[in-house]
Image (cartoon, rainbow, N blue to C red):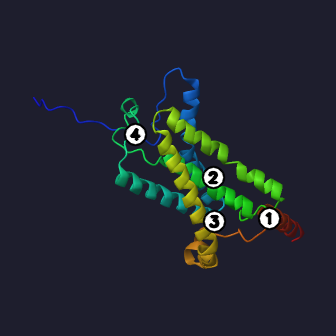
Amino acid sequence: MDSSPPPSLKAVTLTHVRYERGDYFGHFLAWVSLIPVFISLGGFLTHFLFRREIQGLFFALGLLFSQFFNELIKSSVQQSRPATCAILEMCDSHGWPSSHSQYMFFFATYLSLLCLTGTGGTASSWRWRFLHALFPWPTAILTLYSRVYLGYHTVAQVFAGAILGVFLGVVWFWIVNNLFVDYFPGIEDSAVGRFLYIKDTSHIPNVLKFEYDNARAARQKTATD
């Protein structure tokens, strides 16, 4: 009979978020800490399926680059998570900087810059653009807090992730909208762009009005034919 010890097991940590039983606030924060997953799968995947916007594709590409950079730093620094990692079964991974904080603050920074500059294609008054720019920040801050509250990171680790996320978000926004934007027409006209209906509407001041007017014009033309 084989008396060798059973192999050690490791859980898939994508949605493996633990909280203290009976802690309803912790339960809420556990769901909050999954917001990056919801944004990636529900937000960007849906956006590509229904919008096919080049700006959105580069937004998602920036988040992927940010996460890759985060893993590179973690593997280089190799700073341990707090002592609670033993209960959470997370001691085999590193904690500095927090990838959740970095993701959410990159997302909030890039989205805010889209709103403030009007690049998102929703022309409105400065007041409304400012209010739209504030929209992602409460969830970013809650995600940061949840990682400390649930014991996955120290305060220093989540703030390091937040600062890095803001920095990379600003840098990537500048690169996309000052360098890569010149290649958007070529991406639209490429064979892949035409096949997948990939488009860029960031140069249109009010995309909602543009699409509404064109939809109405197409319906009226169909009715008169």
Residue 108 numbered tag: 2
Type of the residue with mark 1: Asn
Picture coordinates of residue 57, whole percent (x, y): 58, 63
Q: What residue does disc 3 label? A: 55
Q: Residues within 10 Å of mark 1 (few under 14, many from 20)?
A: some
Picture coordinates of residue 17, whole percent (x, y): 47, 35
Q: Is residue 91 left or right of residue 104?
A: left
Q: CA distance from mark 3 to mark 1?
A: 15 Å
Viewer-side label of 3, 4: 4
Which quadrant of the figure has residue 221? bottom right
- Which SS class for mark 4? loop
Q: Is residue 160 left or right of residue 111?
A: left
Q: Give whichever of discs 2 and 3 has the lower sequence position.
A: 3
Type of the residue with mark 4: Arg
Q: Residue furthest front?
A: 156
Residue 134 numbered tag: none
Viewer-proximal residue among 55 and 19: 19
Q: Are marks 3 and 4 in contact (CB under 8 Å)?
A: no
Name above or below for residue 74 compared with residue 182: above
Q: Give whichever of discs 2 and 1 has the lower sequence position.
A: 2
Q: What residue does disc 4 label? A: 81
Name above or below for residue 152 compared with residue 121: above
Can residue 176 be seen here? The reply is yes
Which quadrant of the figure has residue 166? bottom right
> For the C terminus, which image quadrant?
bottom right
> For the N terminus, which image quadrant?
top left
